Image (tube, rainbow, N blue to C red):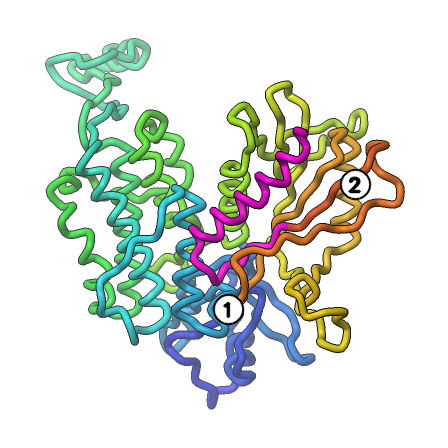
Amino acid sequence: MDPNIVLPREIRLFEYDTCSDQKTATALFERRASLQSYLNKQWLTLGFENQLPCVRATHQVGILPFSDEASTHLLFVAPKGCRDEFDLGLRRFLELLAVGNSDAPLVKIPDGWQGKPAAHKFLLFLAHHYAHLLKELCRYDFRSYYRSEEGDLRSHIRGRLHVAIYARRAVSGKSHLLPCRWEEFTVDNWDNRILWAAARRLKQVAGAIDAQAAAWVWRPFRPLLPWFSAVAEVPITPDDFRKSRLGRTSRFYREALSWARLLLQGSDVPSAGGRVPPLVLDANKAFEQFANVVVRAAMPDISWRVMEQECLDFRAGDVPIRPDLLLRDSGNVVRAIGDTKYKLVVEEVPSSQRQSETPEESVRVRIKSSDWYQLYVYMRTANTSRRFFVVPFWSKDGAAIRWMPQGEFCVPPCGSESQLAVLCLNLLQPIKSVKDQAAARLRHWLSESQS
């Protein structure tokens, strides 16, 4: 390890990329032992850049604290769209999360965030949006609920007495202890514990930046203390979400719990930065959820259904195949199959290769042969002639969407003329507008299959 190379406090990577500064990239690779918990989780990978070993980010966007022998550092993995204009790309990514999880726009945060470090901005955007969801919940639907409890009571029985345990204790002279199980109706239920733990998680991660950052992030949550002050501050792991109940009956809890799950992802991962936990968001999953929202909004008839990851039998005795999206009509007939690819397959066509200067001629899609093979099998198995890909692209000045019909298969999978298309979503345009335009275009295409 070169002692002359000092890592900065905050190190920035982009999705699927490494440090732009070669010296920092080399120093980070030499400290890979400090990142082992993230490498085990495949939030980071080891690779080569310009024939030199390096640490490379994956599709997990967020803050990964780690410590070396000298100090603590923050590894911030930024979304792809942040390369050219950081603030715009960060906001669009969080809009993508907001629309994908609750089909609601991202909350505008007050002035004062401009000029702050990248990781601080990231946490501020998250904190204000999540605090807004909790405020709406407290205003309209804050609930008490039952929480399972058990313990040894004296002089009275509460709930159900565990007879077998009591009998063993009575023989040993401890008949005064009554092992009971009961249900406590309280605001200190698991749903509220999970929601408040996510808020505390944001503050805790911000504390790794500095005390001022933690105060800024915690500010929107202070008005919620009268509701959550009675909620116990207990550690939450992904397994605790199984104890949640209120999300099944309350829209407010369902939306807030969806965001809490995002914020608490990785809470069972050993921290590489001492007490400070990581905070990461799965960009691949975020795009898939957004694509699902687009497709559901595009249904040409209320009787149509969107089936996610539905099993299709392909080979007897083998594992069934699972297309991302199956679109079924009222007669349960598969009308189309959708496939989401979080890959950069849209590229600009060089001027020398264009036949004209129309928008359709200026770009093309490069979809791998393996994806086309998979597409063919899906179409043949589901017996449908329509299939579409949903892919992202990033263009600050480009159109919100691009609809790109593709050529037919030489041998149609279903014996009839197949219709293939690629729906390209521009993730640097206002996400709500992208969703509306994409849904309208896809709806028009699907309506043609009804005629």
Quadrant containing the C terminus is top right
Q: Are marks 2 and 1 in contact (CB under 8 Å)?
A: no
Q: Position of residue 128 (x, y in %)?
A: 26, 55
Where, by quadrant of the figure, is residue 44 drawn? bottom right
Q: Label 2 is placed on what type of residue?
A: Tyr
Instruction: Give the mark count.
Output: 2
Nearest to the observer: residue 126 or residue 244: 126
Identify the residue under disc 1: 397
Q: Say which residue appears at 39% left-offset and 61% top-offset.
A: 91
Q: Say which residue appears at 49% left-offset and 52% top-offset.
A: 434
Nearest to the observer: residue 132 or residue 421: 421
Q: Nearer the viewer, mark 2 or mark 1?
A: 1
Nearest to the observer: residue 446 or residue 156: 446
Crowd band around label 2 with a 10 angstrom C-alpha radius: few (<14), some (14–19), many (20+): some
Q: Is residue 357 among the parts visible in the rendering?
A: yes
Main SS, magenta residues = helix
Magenta residues, start to end: 423-451
Q: Label 1 is placed on what type of residue?
A: Asp
Q: Which mark is residue 376?
A: 2
Quote the CA–CA distance across marks 2 and 1: 34 Å
Where, by quadrant of the figure, is residue 204 drawn? bottom left
**Going by the image, does 119 lie left or right of 185?**
right
Q: Position of residue 398 (x, y in %)?
A: 54, 65
Q: Is 446 colored magenta in this rendering?
A: yes
Q: Is 422 colored magenta in this rendering?
A: no
Q: Say which residue appears at 67% left-offset and 44% top-offset.
A: 388
Residue 247, placed above or below residue 166 = below
Residue 228, placed above or below residue 165 = below
Q: Is residue 267 among the parts visible in the rendering?
A: no
Query: Which structural element holds mark 2?
Result: helix
**Going by the image, does 352 lie left or right of 197?**
right
**Going by the image, does 374 lie left or right of 224?**
right
